[in-house]
Image (cartoon, grey):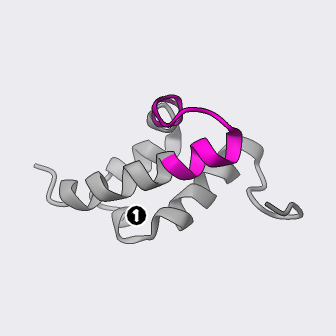
């Protein structure tokens, strides 16, 4: 059973907001995109401890997944 589902329940909306802001999309669309990502699958994995990281850190991982480089060399 998911022991850290409450932690993830607070992280995911914040990650969706960050994605929505970054890409100029709705939070619903951002949530859908995030849930289809490998980053979201990793967040759901109880054993890797990703749920213990900040929303901003996980957002960075999501960007790396999309671009292969994340925030390297770019500014917001």
Q: Is residue 23 magenta?
A: yes
SS label for mark 1: helix
Q: Residue at x 14, y 59 (%)?
A: 3
Q: Main secondary structure of the magenta part?
A: helix
Residue 15 location, x and y as percent?
A: 48, 52
The answer to which of 56 and 76 lies nearer the viewer is 76
Q: How many numbered tags mark residues here?
A: 1
Does 40 sit above or below residue 11?
Answer: above
Q: Residue at x 59, y 46 (%)?
A: 19
Q: Which residue is mark 1?
A: 50
Q: Which residue is the extreme one toward the right?
A: 73
Residue 16 falls left or right of residue 59: left
Find the magenta span and give its range: 17-32
Give residue 50's quadrant in the image: bottom left
Residue 12 location, x and y as percent?
A: 39, 50
Q: Residue at x 50, y 38 (%)?
A: 34
The 10 Å Cα crowd at callout 1, few under 14, some 14 to 19, many 20 or more, is some
Residue 25 falls left or right of residue 28: right
The answer to which of 47 and 43 lies nearer the viewer is 43
Q: Which residue is the extreme one toward the left?
A: 1
Quarter the C terminus occupies: bottom right
The answer to which of 22 and 67 lies nearer the viewer is 22
Residue 35 falls left or right of residue 20: left
Residue 75 location, x and y as percent?
A: 84, 63
Q: Residue at x 82, y 64 (%)?
A: 72
The answer to which of 74 and 48 lies nearer the viewer is 74
Q: Is residue 67 magenta?
A: no
Residue 51 location, x and y as percent?
A: 35, 63
């Amino acid at each position: 059973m998911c022991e850290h589902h409450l932690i993830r329940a607070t992280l995911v909306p914040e990650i969706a907001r960050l994605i929505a802001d970054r890409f100029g999309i709705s939070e619903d669309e951002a949530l859908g995109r995030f849930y289809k990502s490998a980053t979201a699958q990793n967040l759901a994995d109880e054993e890797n401890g990703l749920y213990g990281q900040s929303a901003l850190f996980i957002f960075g991982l999501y960007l790396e997944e999309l671009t292969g480089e994340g925030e390297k060399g770019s500014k917001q």
